[in-house]
Amino acid sequence: MQQKTKQIVAVTSIVIVMGLLLAQPIKGLVNDDTTEATTSGSSSSTVTFESVSLQAKQGLNASILQEISTIESQLPDASGQEKIELLQQLATEWDDVNRPAPLGFVYEELAELDPKFDYWLKAGDAYRAAYTNLQDTTMVKALNGYAINAYQKALELNADDLDAKTGLGSAYVSGTNNPMAGIALLREVVEADPSHIGANKSLGLFSMQSRQFDRAIERFKTVISVQPDAESYFYLATSYENIGLKREAISAFEKSRDLAADPTLTQFINRKIDELSK
């Protein structure tokens, strides 16, 4: 049931992400600026584990809320392996209810206690997932900064990991003054692994954001050749639609609808197909 809930949340957020992408092009994305990528950390002091945890608890049912609160109440007096085990339990709880912001903080605390590559990578991935659909610019900036720090820490432990490079590159594009530094990292990943799903998907999304839909199409075709999913077919369809390839757009929308099997997305896609069929 929890896995199904996470899937529905992810699927129904596709339309939101698409709207944000096309409405807010990233400044400098198509300009090859060589200045160093930087991000401001001034907003991070207002976005803390406590603040995001409080916000994330809104809307949770009483039993899950009690489980989370019970674990949190034990953390101040715990240390060593006991604290690590409690944090692992807390990470599972936040992951099960699809709350990536507090999940990122939990993994970062785990990484501070037990400096493992996987903890830093999971922290970065959680922070990045948390800010992807947000419109609160203060929180987006803070979470983006946390993500960059986590990916950098991960790469200090494994400099060649392509997933960490993908995360860092994507975070650079989304939240620094030099998105091309991030694009360069993502291109480095696909040079090493042309079929890398994460890097191709990120490059596809950023191509859409800069309205380079022909490039986006090639990226998403690569993704679905390796791992077909509703999200990638939706982005592929939208890219086709934006360059006037209606038949191809309809076909991709239909595949997205069938893979998602989500009522909300199905209704939206059916309306799109009706519009494109006229």
Image (cartoon, rainbow, N blue to C red):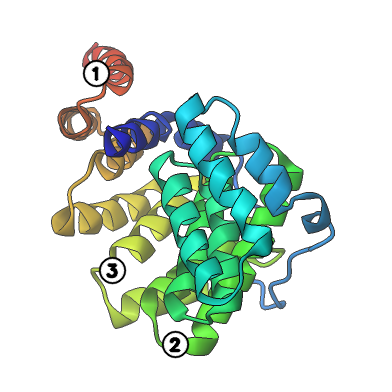
Instruction: Reply above or below: 102 against 263.
Output: below
**Which circle's residue, 3 or 1, is located before the other in the chain?**
3
Of helix, strand and loop, which one carries label 3? Answer: loop
Kindly identify which residue carries mark 3: 196
Find the distance from the CA under tag 2 to the CA under tag 1. 45 Å
Kindly identify which residue carries mark 2: 158
Q: Quadrant of the N terminus?
A: top left
Q: How many C-alpha atoms fall within 10 Å of the one at disc 3: few (<14), some, or many (≥20)?
A: some
Q: Which residue is drawn at the image coordinates 16% and 59% (left, top)?
A: 226
The amino acid type of the residue labelled 1 equals: Ile
Residue 203 on image: x %, y %:
41, 60
Query: Does residue 143 appear left or right of residue 202 in this picture?
Result: right
Find the distance from the CA under tag 3 to the CA under tag 2. 18 Å
Find the distance from the CA under tag 3 to the CA under tag 1. 30 Å
Q: Quadrant of the C terminus?
A: top left
Instruction: Reply above or below: 120 against 141.
Output: below
Q: Which residue is drawn at the image coordinates 66% and 44% (left, top)?
A: 52
Q: Which residue is drawn at the image coordinates 23% and 68% (left, top)?
A: 195
